Image (cartoon, helix red, strand yellow):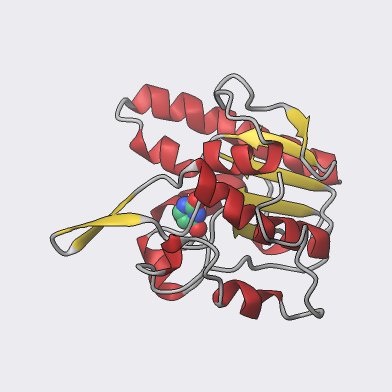
Amino acid sequence: AQLAGCASAWSGPEGALPEAIAACTRCPLHRAATQAVVGEGPKDADLMIVGEQPGDQEDLSGRPFIGPAGQLFNELAAGAGLDRRNAYVTNAVKHFKFTPRGRRRIHQRPNSSEIEHCRWWLDAELAEVKPKLVLAMGATAVESLTGSRAAVLSRRGKVETGRGGEPVLITLHPSYLLRLPDPQARADASAAFQEDLRSAVRMIS
Ligand code: URA
């Protein structure tokens, strides 16, 4: 649904999107975050990869997926024949949501309102890049792109139709793999994740 008082789509001049996202105050998350983290990669990429939101390191550096989740992603992607540099990599939510605990900043999952406010920017990125396929990693990306909050574990590996009609391949989030305490469970989930990355490569070839 369209948010009250807002136009239905961003329509700034070409090339102005990163600056517009950087100046975003559409939801309260911009107040505590260091900066908005804009997507990166070729503007004509066949594959768009969507994560949840920047983490601590991404918030400080301004680049998506450079921390532990990004490093695991790079490793598993390379093993699946996917070179991240050929994809446009972004997040469903552009600001880091956290609660301070001492000197640490503890990640908080964005809520549906924050996801909905930030979908404005994800839609603008989709309109600019026009990927052949979108890879949605984890529940937040899946909710933003498909509008459905149904469990990701039972949907992974499948292609659903995104809100704008784009094909969305659903997969797990690399942070989920990092959080699995049992080595066998982690190996199994990583294998499933890599299988999805291989499917993505096949679908855009
Ligand atoms: N997790 C995400 O979803 N995105 C990032 O950019 C980093 C960690």
Left or right side of 41 for 33: left
Residue lying at 46% horizontally and 43% vertically, measured from the top left: 111
State whether residue 10 is above or below residue 171.
below
In percent of width and height, residue 45 lies at 79, 61
Q: Position of residue 188 (x, y in %)?
A: 48, 24
Report the quarter where the N terminus lies.
top right
98 horizontally vs 131: left or right: left
- List x then y, in percent, for residue 70: 48, 55
> Where, by quadrant of the figure, is residue 59 drawn?
bottom left
Most foreground residue, 141 or 204: 141
Q: Based on the displayed image, in which of its 4 quarters is residue 196 positioned?
A: top right
Left or right of 146: which side holds 99? left
Between residues 82 and 39, which one lies in front from this camera angle?
Answer: 39
Q: Is residue 75 above or below residue 57?
A: above
The answer to whether residue 34 shows anywhere in this view is yes
The reply to whether residue 80 is in sight is no
